């Protein structure tokens, strides 16, 4: 741990990338505590980059997708929130708060298995107040054939029977496979044109550390709506169009940077 | 090491991201061998993302920058190649080949110090045939005041007296500091608008695993040119304009993806 402490001490608080570096530190700590896989660090870096060219804020397209996502979760018969190491390391409290407020269970679904990893994530989430945690008992798992890798092992009370799967962070081609089993998929992915983003029914292109608090806020607004009002929100949402709007935002950002970026020069 | 082997076995060769995953594996192995810092994994992920939106190929702007970079290295009085953990892990052979062919020494210049790390990188580069390795003997280092962090400790025979510093991969605000000491900086950075990219005299926006082989090829073309011919190449190169051209390429790529990305859907 010493080495990492050293790393942190070299980062002054007025560093222009301080917030980003703080979450980076959480991910590195997560790896040391077995919660995050090594490849999860690289995935985090990819996210950082896309967040950067999206201006590191929740844009209007993301807000629309978040609203539709909450409506779909409220309408679902058997919704489930799929949890991986990165989301558990980055925002365990917000993840648990959303799960509890929605009354939707969390299911651990890991690509990389390693001794002690499930236990570490379980402890992290239970410390944050998780009450309904699935995907823990490996002996009771069932398989979903459409999924490859370790992810095919799912909980019979969770992803297996779910009609709506919320995938806060994704690291593979799972949204395609879940779609092919007839489930609806809500994804959070900073890459707007990943296979995950394209295949999902609702794609939230934003940083998970901003998305979960926003979902909790929106849930307070929507939880008392009637079914037909929630359906109207869903029907007014077009995922493809929304992703295309995100791509336009990236283009606008890059255009602005063509002169702006050089203003740091003397 | 077992865990990482497991990770690799789960990646089929026909995976659409196979090449990218192979380099990712090199970086993860590098971390286990002390060559790469934990934060180096995240930096690698950021690079992956920018490479992705540049179409994962060496574009014309990068080729122009590579040519100017080789010309500047040939014209320099005291050129130096600065080495960090990621470049040593990703392409040690090409790095050493370029150093030997140019007759320019390699200098280790690390942000994160850790016991055994310098030794690990030294061994990696010497196995690849490195003959002239600086920045190894910490007792003989001198400081450059303009630089912050561990990077301020430099070799009196290398970066300290250099007129041209080639920084194949950068993880801080060093190009600004080096510029302020009057040195010329050549940077390879997949982020075209990082502070490194903006401050450098010559910014190569491309993946290091493609840049080094291209530099070796270009070196064969340029090594017999006269000084005024090399100067002409340099004078015809405009770094700001070149970076702006890269930004236009990214915009073009994103535009193309607005429909293209959705073609994977049935």
Image (tube, coloured by chain):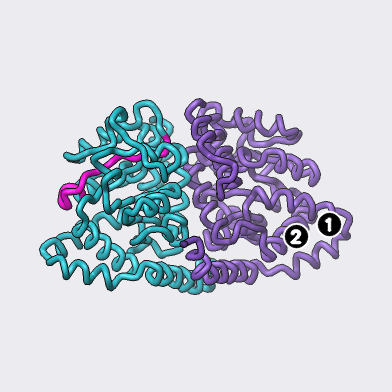
Chain colours: A cyan, B purple
Chain of the residue under the numbered disc 2 shown in the image: B
Label 1 crowding class (10 Å Cα cut-off): few <14, some 14-19, many 20+? some
Question: Can you say whether A123 is above or below A51 in the image?
Answer: above
Expressed as whole percent of the image width and height from the top left, the position of residue B246 reads 60, 67
Q: Which mark is residue A98?
A: none
Segment tinted magenta in the rendering: A99-112
Expressed as whole percent of the image width and height from the top left, the position of residue A252 reads: 46, 73
Tell me, yes or no, if residue B119 can be seen here.
Answer: yes
Which chain does the numbered disc 1 sit on? B
Location of the N terminus of chain A by quadrant is top left
Q: Quadrant of residue A147?
A: top left
Q: Give the mark nearer the N terminus: 2 vs 1.
A: 2
Query: Would residue A35 appear left or right of B184 to someone viewing this image?
Result: left
| Front position in the image: A123 or B143 | A123
Residue drawn at x 70%, y 52% is B163
The disc label shown at residue B222, or none: 1
- In the image, residue B208 sits, relative to residue A39, either above or below, namely below
């Amino acid at each position: 741990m010493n080495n990492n402490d050293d790393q942190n001490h070299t980062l002054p608080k007025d560093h222009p990338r301080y917030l980003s570096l703080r979450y980076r530190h959480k991910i590195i700590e997560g790896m040391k505590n077995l919660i995050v896989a090594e490849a999860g660090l690289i995935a985090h870096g990819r996210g950082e980059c896309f967040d950067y060219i999206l201006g590191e804020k929740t844009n209007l397209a993301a807000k629309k997708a978040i609203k539709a996502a909450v409506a779909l979760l409220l309408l679902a018969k058997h919704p489930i929130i799929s949890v991986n190491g990165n989301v558990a390391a980055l925002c365990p409290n917000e993840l648990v708060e959303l799960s509890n407020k929605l009354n939707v269970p969390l299911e651990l679904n890991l690509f990389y298995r390693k001794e002690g990893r499930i236990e570490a994530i379980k402890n992290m989430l239970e410390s944050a107040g998780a009450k309904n945690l699935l995907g823990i008992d490996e002996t009771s798992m069932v398989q979903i054939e459409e999924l490859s890798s370790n992810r095919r092992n799912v909980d019979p009370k969770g992803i297996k029977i779910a009609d709506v799967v919320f995938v806060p962070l994704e690291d593979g081609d799972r949204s395609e496979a879940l779609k092919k089993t007839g489930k609806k998929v809500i994804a959070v992915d900073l890459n707007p044109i990943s296979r995950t983003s394209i295949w999902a029914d609702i794609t939230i292109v934003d940083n998970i550390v901003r998305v979960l608090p926003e979902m909790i806020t929106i849930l307070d607004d929507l939880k008392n709506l009637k079914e037909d009002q929630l359906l109207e929100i869903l029907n007014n949402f077009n995922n493809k169009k929304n992703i295309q709007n995100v791509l336009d935002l990236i283009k606008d950002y890059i255009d602005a940077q063509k002169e702006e970026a050089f203003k740091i020069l003397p």
